[in-house]
Image (tube, helix red, strand yellow):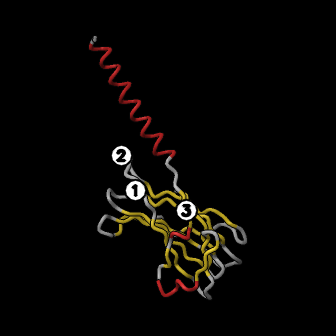
Amino acid sequence: MKPMFKMLLSSAAVATIAVAGLADSASAGRRVPAFAGIAQQPSQAGCLSNSLGVITNNCSGFVGFCIGLPYDYNVFGNWADMTVTVFQPGSATLSCQAVTTFKDGGFAGWSTNINADRTGTFTDIALHGGGIPDQGGVYTCCSLPPGGRMAVVNY
């Protein structure tokens, strides 16, 4: 085999692997129902109800509700980008955030609190929590007002 042909063949193989890796990461969307989460304060868990995976706050005050999100290692990086589908009742503000941690549980980064933009209907809150450290973790938390609901996280 001529050296130039070997180089072209090697370049084509590397390009194929790189494109396949990009395709996998772009199409590896995940969805987690809110039912997979937990009240941030365990004493408030009794105020929450579940209906078909949608969590509703039945308390008279705000309840923090969090969902840990499994992710797969990716050589191109892991990003805490997601949408959280929520229902914001009346005029109360419902906000969510994405948080990343190091493998020891130490704080790595967060998206800031983002408020739902509509009331009286389900809407998506887009969160951009930054990079997930190697072997680290990611989760999202929402502050649910009375009657507020959290349905699903897409990431």
**Cα gap from disc 3 to disc 1, whole angstroms:** 18 Å
Q: Could you tell me residue 54's position as x and y percent? A: 62, 70
At numbered mark 2, what does the secondary structure look like: helix, strand or loop? loop
Residue at label 2?
Answer: 75
Q: Are marks 2 and 3 in contact (CB under 8 Å)?
A: no
Q: Could you tell me residue 65's position as x and y percent? A: 52, 75
The amino acid type found where label 3 is placed reads Val
Going by the image, does 142 lie left or right of 77? right
The disc, 3 or 1, on the residue closer to the chain's N-terminal end is 1
Q: Could you tell me residue 143's position as x and y percent? A: 55, 76
**Cα gap from disc 2 to disc 3, whole angstroms:** 23 Å
At numbered mark 1, what does the secondary structure look like: helix, strand or loop? strand
Q: Are marks 2 and 1 in contact (CB under 8 Å)?
A: no
**Cα gap from disc 2 to disc 1, whole angstroms:** 12 Å
At numbered mark 3, what does the secondary structure look like: helix, strand or loop? strand
Q: Assess disc 1: are there few (<14), some (14-19) or many (≥20) residues with their C-alpha within 10 Å of its C-alpha.
A: some
Going by the image, does 68 lie left or right of 120? left
Query: Is residue 5 positioned above or below 154 on the image?
Result: above
Judging depth in this view, the residue of 82 and 29 nearest the camera is 29
The amino acid type found where label 1 is placed reads Gly
Q: Is residue 147 visible?
A: yes
Residue at label 1?
Answer: 131
Q: Is residue 112 visible?
A: no
Residue 121 image-quadrant placement: bottom right
The amino acid type found where label 2 is placed reads Val
Q: Nearer the viewer, mark 2 or mark 1?
A: 2
Residue at label 3?
Answer: 153
Q: Nearer the viewer, mark 3 or mark 1?
A: 3
- Tell me the residue at 46%/45% (across/down): 25
